[in-house]
Image (cartoon, rainbow, N blue to C red):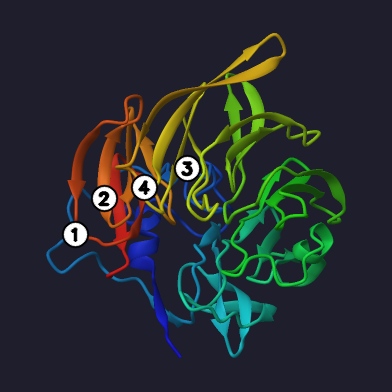
């Protein structure tokens, strides 16, 4: 079996290097990192006073834990850390002590998922107060008590929202749940199923469904477009804006890849502007959204093939986007799409932003 290490010095360097983050009750304005790419889903931490330089030997290691296969990010609330990975023939959600790495509880999501490009769960858990939501590679969504791991409810997303019988995706279900008030929003299943679905977060009952095209492997985003809340999601043919209360389509933008795969969630770069970026030699595009006469117009501002986010999204700082163009870390001007610089040291990887610093983890370690 292959193993990976959860290194607190890498994954949490933006939370704890300053020494400002303590353990105990959640701090919604500081160290909590409650879902995929952080509490705002933008890859940005609010921590400050972080070290400008590391010693030559690297930052001091707090703890490390040997874990199994998977692609989940961590979710953190107070003194608890949640992550999914394969263990003893099952995909499991683990609750760990954030200060020591000690196990508090574990919950089996489904059987081990074996796939040629990498085994284990893909989605990141989402924490909402005393509840944690997690979904494994086979598309079974769970609501659990965050304190003890007891199940509140479960829902098989694939079986509920698709007539197909051969699995939600052949590469594994990858959509991380989004919480909006009393509603949980998640990407659905493959046609003829529902593309995006909204559930009552307390019961798992369906509130609305949206169907238009293939779901892809992305996660939904909440954006306020010129002050109007919308669910914006990458889907197979591009991206769409959806009314969060009704599921009605507000707008759509076609951005088709070779395999109808738009994996990375869209990113809002201005009050009325949204970027979509895809791998498979596709590139990126910026669109402007304007409401006129009760409907939304989509205007394409730029496209390029030099900023191809494949698996992980970018971060925005002072009008510039930082992210991976396949295996190259790049900076581009968000409003023009022009490349500013490129770094080829990392291979494919992920990037987060904290205290005006980029923290980059490459697949080569």
Can you tell which mark lies on residue 345? 1
In the image, is residue 279 above or below residue 255?
A: below
Q: Marks 2 and 4: in contact by CB < 8 Å?
A: no
Which of the two labelled residues, at mark 2 and mark 1, occupies the earlier sequence position? 2
Question: SS of the residue at dot 2?
Answer: strand
Quadrant of the image occupied by residue 150: bottom right
The reply, left or right, for residue 331 in relation to residue 315 is: left
Question: SS of the residue at dot 3?
Answer: loop
Please provide percent x and percent y for residue 138: 68, 71
Q: Is residue 50 visible?
A: no
Q: Nearer the viewer, residue 1 or 249?
A: 249
Can you tell which mark lies on residue 308? 4
Which of the two labelled residues, at mark 3 and mark 4, occupies the earlier sequence position? 3
Question: SS of the residue at dot 4?
Answer: loop
Residue at 76% over, 64% down = 158
Q: How far apart, in angstroms, are the residues tagged by discs 3 and 1?
A: 24 Å
Please provide percent x and percent y for residue 273: 48, 25
Q: Marks 3 and 2: in contact by CB < 8 Å?
A: no
Can you tell which mark lies on residue 56? none
Residue at 26% over, 45% down = 330
Q: How far apart, in angstroms, are the residues tagged by discs 2 and 1?
A: 8 Å
Q: How far apart, in angstroms, are the residues tagged by discs 2 and 3?
A: 17 Å
Q: Marks 1 and 2: in contact by CB < 8 Å?
A: yes
Q: Is residue 62 visible?
A: yes
Q: How far apart, in angstroms, are the residues tagged by discs 3 and 4?
A: 17 Å
Residue at 15% over, 69% down = 57
The reply, left or right, for residue 107 in relation to residue 47 is: right
Which of the two labelled residues, at mark 3 and mark 1, occupies the earlier sequence position? 3
Q: Nearer the viewer, residue 292 or 52?
A: 292
Q: Residue furthest front?
A: 258
What residue does disc 2 label? 329
């Amino acid at each position: 079996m292959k193993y990976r290490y959860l290194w607190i010095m890498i994954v949490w360097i933006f939370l704890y290097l300053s020494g400002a983050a303590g353990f105990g009750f959640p701090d919604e304005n500081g160290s909590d990192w409650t879902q995929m790419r952080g509490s705002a889903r933008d890859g940005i931490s609010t921590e400050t006073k972080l070290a400008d330089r590391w010693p030559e030997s690297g930052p001091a290691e707090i703890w490390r834990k040997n874990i199994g296969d998977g692609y989940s990010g961590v979710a953190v609330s107070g003194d608890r850390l949640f992550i999914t990975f394969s263990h003893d023939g099952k995909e499991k959600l683990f609750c760990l002590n954030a200060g020591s790495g000690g196990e508090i509880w574990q919950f089996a999501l489904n059987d081990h998922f074996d796939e040629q490009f990498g085994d284990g769960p893909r989605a990141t858990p989402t924490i909402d107060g005393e509840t944690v939501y997690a979904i494994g590679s086979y598309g079974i969504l769970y609501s659990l008590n965050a304190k003890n791991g007891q199940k509140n409810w479960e829902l098989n997303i694939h079986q509920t929202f698709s007539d197909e019988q051969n699995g939600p995706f052949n590469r594994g279900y990858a959509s991380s749940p989004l919480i909006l008030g009393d509603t949980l929003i998640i990407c659905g299943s493959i046609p003829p199923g529902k593309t995006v679905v909204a559930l009552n977060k307390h019961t798992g009952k369906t509130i609305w469904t949206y169907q238009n095209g293939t779901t892809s492997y992305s996660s939904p985003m909440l954006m306020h477009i010129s002050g109007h809340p919308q669910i914006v999601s990458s889907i197979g043919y591009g991206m769409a804006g959806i009314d969060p209360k009704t599921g009605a389509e507000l707008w759509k933008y076609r951005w088709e890849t070779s395999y109808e795969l738009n994996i990375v969630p869209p990113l809002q770069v201005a009050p009325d502007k949204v970027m979509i970026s895809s791998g498979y030699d596709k590139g990126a595009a910026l669109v402007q959204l304007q409401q006129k006469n009760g409907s939304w117009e989509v205007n394409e501002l730029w496209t390029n093939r030099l900023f191809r986010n494949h698996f992980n999204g970018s971060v925005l700082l002072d009008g510039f986007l930082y992210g991976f163009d396949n295996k190259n870390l790049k900076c581009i001007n968000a409003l023009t799409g022009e490349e500013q610089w490129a770094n080829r040291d990392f291979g494919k990887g992920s990037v987060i932003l904290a205290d005006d610093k980029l923290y980059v983890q490459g697949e080569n370690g």
